[in-house]
Image: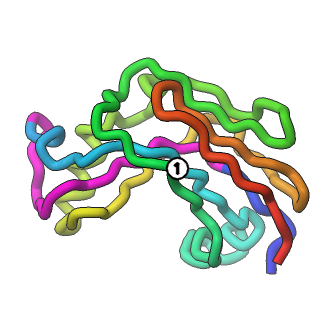
Amino acid sequence: MSERIDHEAELAIVIGRICKDVPVERVNDVIFGYTIANDVTARDLQKKDGQWTRAKGFDTFCPIGPWVDTDFVPGTQKITATIAGEVKQSAQISDMIFDVPTIVNFVSRVMTLLPGDIILTGTPAGIGPMVAGEKATMAIEGLGELTNKVSAR
């Protein structure tokens, strides 16, 4: 259904307890840990539809992992996306437009968060296409790497 599937390397926040309206200063109390995500997007469908539901909702989109680190503390660690051996995205977590406390506070004001819920934090500049046969590796210093082979349906 899509002619362009893009990678988006992202820090993923894993919620550890039921929470609502979490104050910024209490955010760490509700986070279980962190992991890595590739927020795969059918960019042509996003543009056509004018919103993101279909473009981000296909089976196998948004691989997450490979584990959850409960001791990770976001700071200046580098986040990268490497596609077919070429670095396409590279930035520090501290360069994010909104920091983790602000993101969790905002989302928890909109909806009740449950244990196991995952919040993606946004992606650095450099998103771009992936094609069948390539390897996509999302990495965050201190968290590890998430590598998937890109394949057609």
Numbered disc 1: secondary structure? strand
Question: Image point 83% across, 32% down: which residue?
Answer: 86
* Vertical arrangement, residue 45 with respect to residue 96, above or below: below
Q: Which residue is mark 1?
A: 66
**Residue 127 percent coordinates (x, y):** 70, 44
Task: Using the rendered view, name the quadrant where residue 110 is placed.
Answer: bottom left
Magenta-drawn stretch contains 35: no
Number of dots carrying numbers: 1
- Left or right for 1, reference 51: right
Q: Is residue 81 left or right of residue 107?
A: right
Instruction: Compare residues 138 and 9 and report the one nearer the observer.
Output: 138
The colour style of the image is rainbow
**Residue placed farthest to the front in the image?**
67
Q: Is 53 or 72 nearer to us in this picture?
A: 72
Q: Amino acid at mark 1?
A: Pro
Confirm whether the magenta stretch covers residue 13.
yes
Q: What residue is drawn where x is 72% and y is 67%?
A: 42
Q: Quadrant of residue 52?
A: bottom right
Residue farthest to the top?
76
Q: Which range of residues does the magenta coloring cover?
A: 8-25
In the rendered structure, the answer to whether residue 78 lies left or right of residue 114 reads: right
Viewport quadrant of the C terminus: bottom right
User: x, y percentage for residue 146?
Assistant: 61, 46
Q: Where in the figure is residue 5, as x and y percent of width and height? A: 77, 62
The residue drawn where x is 80% and y is 59% is 150
Vertical arrangement, residue 3 with respect to residue 67, above or below: below
**In the picture, which quadrant includes the N terminus?**
bottom right
